[in-house]
Image: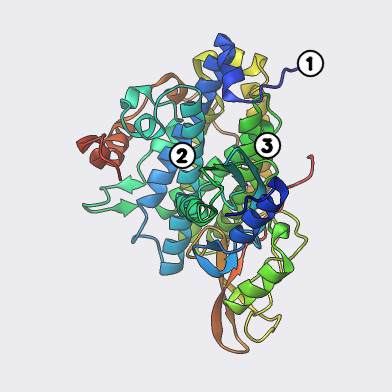
Amino acid sequence: MAELQRIVNAEQAKEQAEYLAALKELLFQMADDDLMIAYRGSEWLGLAPHIEEDVAFSSMSQDTMGHAVMFYTLLEELGAGKADDLAQLRDSAEFRNTILVERANGTGNYMVNPHFDWAYSIVRFYLYDLFKLVRLEVLSQCSYIPLAQVSRKMLTELNYHLMHWRVWIKQLANSTEDARERLMAALEKVNADIGDAFKLGPMADAIIRHGLMIPEKEIRERWERKANEAFHACGINWTKPAESPQLEGRAGQHTEDCVDAVRTLSEVYRLDPATSW
Amino acid sequence: MTLLADDSLEKALWALLEEVKDPEMPPVSLVEMGMIHQVSIADGIVAVEVLPTFVGCPALKLMKKSISEKLSELEQVREIRVNFVFDPPWTSDRISDAGREKLRSFGIAPPPKSHKPGEMWEVNCPYCGSPYTKMENLFGPAACRSILYCPKCKNPFEAFKPIAVSGSN
């Protein structure tokens, strides 16, 4: 592999058109992933199985939302626009998040008959965070130094989220037959979507060539190793996810759930974007 | 008014920063938390580099404001620039011994000085010192703290999460 250049700040990144475009594309994928999953997490507030879980889930969602803010801020420094606007004024078709993070928590919605699926949430957040772990481990060595630095910091925080999900998976796996069945059904549902997360979108080649990310196949392999270990430790037969899901979130293809989420999370901001909060 | 030389000015700035407290843990200063990385002054412009404990900590804006207000007490200061930086990353071993003691006095168990990322850690009760404590919730009122219970003195308390950077793996 050729010697990789190190880009130390936004000004330097802006001097190279292709590098800048690839970097922005990757940052949008990460920012939108974290924004969307944090939003779904926050929808559990008041609905989680017990009050301690309410506190924990809210804390993790706030932390994850903070990561999204950091990614949007890096985009702002690169001239992509104001961080708040990027999160809340784009059309859902412009979002680059993976399908897995946009899925609703269950049937109904937060305000009306929320029949949310706890097992699905646990499995989804755990497997997404394992993917985030793979991604941040790579990024902490990437060519864009500001991104490498924040990734290293985020890893220290992600460890705590993973510890939390691990406890839940273990509990569900060793609980009643009903809990185990729900866990397996959730795993199947997540497996149908997660293949999309590993994709790098329309600028994949440039993203890899410029030392920002590793190829999709390698991301998938690293994730599969971690997921396999995690589930085997709980006595669950883990199966590999589908190769290619139908929708590609990285290319702006999304479900109705994404449209709903963007509409709801930006509702207040869109009333008057010029207001100072 | 006597104009201070740059190095004594820097000392004066550090002394003022000792008075800037953590908004959520008022007995402890940002200096004791190990959050102030660098302070410099040139031509009346002060640059402060702050290391956030957590990337998305909602108290950061408040800290920035308190730092600016405090440092503007010094006559020689014309402008204050507070920047949050991530190199070096803030780790919990940066908290000073005085800071640890103040956390404990506030009912927050300080983090261990050495910690292996991803592993559980031992927490002594900040009130009675008992090592037999129970983790009630890894996540507490802020991202940086957990909630525990001491069966010996029957007090609930918080513990600051250890934050360490993993080696090159």
Q: Quadrant of residue A58?
A: bottom left
Q: Is residue B8 above or below residue B32?
A: above
Q: Which residue is mark 2?
A: A69
Q: Considering only order in the chain, which callout, 1 or 2, is on the residue closer to the N terminus?
A: 1
Q: Quadrant of residue A165?
A: bottom right
Q: Which residue is mark 3?
A: A137
Q: Considering only order in the chain, which callout, 3 or 2, is on the residue closer to the N terminus?
A: 2
| Chain for numbered disc 1 | A
Horizontal placement of A154 versus A79: left or right?
A: right
Residue B61 point in image, percent of width and height: 46, 50
Q: Amino acid at mark 2?
A: Val
Measure the C-alpha gap from mark 1 to mark 3.
20 Å
What residue is drawn where x is 64% and y is 18%?
A208
Q: Is residue B167 above or below residue B116?
A: above
Residue B22 point in image, percent of width and height: 54, 62
Residue at disc 2, secondary structure: helix
Measure the C-alpha gap from mark 2 to mark 3.
19 Å
Residue at disc 1, secondary structure: loop
Q: Amino acid at mark 1?
A: Glu
> What is the quadrant of the C terminus of chain B in the image?
top right
Residue A183 visible? The answer is: no
Q: Quadrant of residue B168?
A: top right
Residue B130 point in image, percent of width and height: 69, 84
Asked if badges 2 and 3 are on one and the same chain, I answer yes
Q: Which residue is mark 1?
A: A3
Q: Residues within 10 Å of mark 1 (few under 14, many from 20)?
A: few
Q: Considering only order in the chain, which callout, 3 or 1, is on the residue closer to the N terminus?
A: 1
* 2 vs 3, front mark: 2
> Is B8 in front, or is B2?
B2
| Chain for numbered disc 2 | A
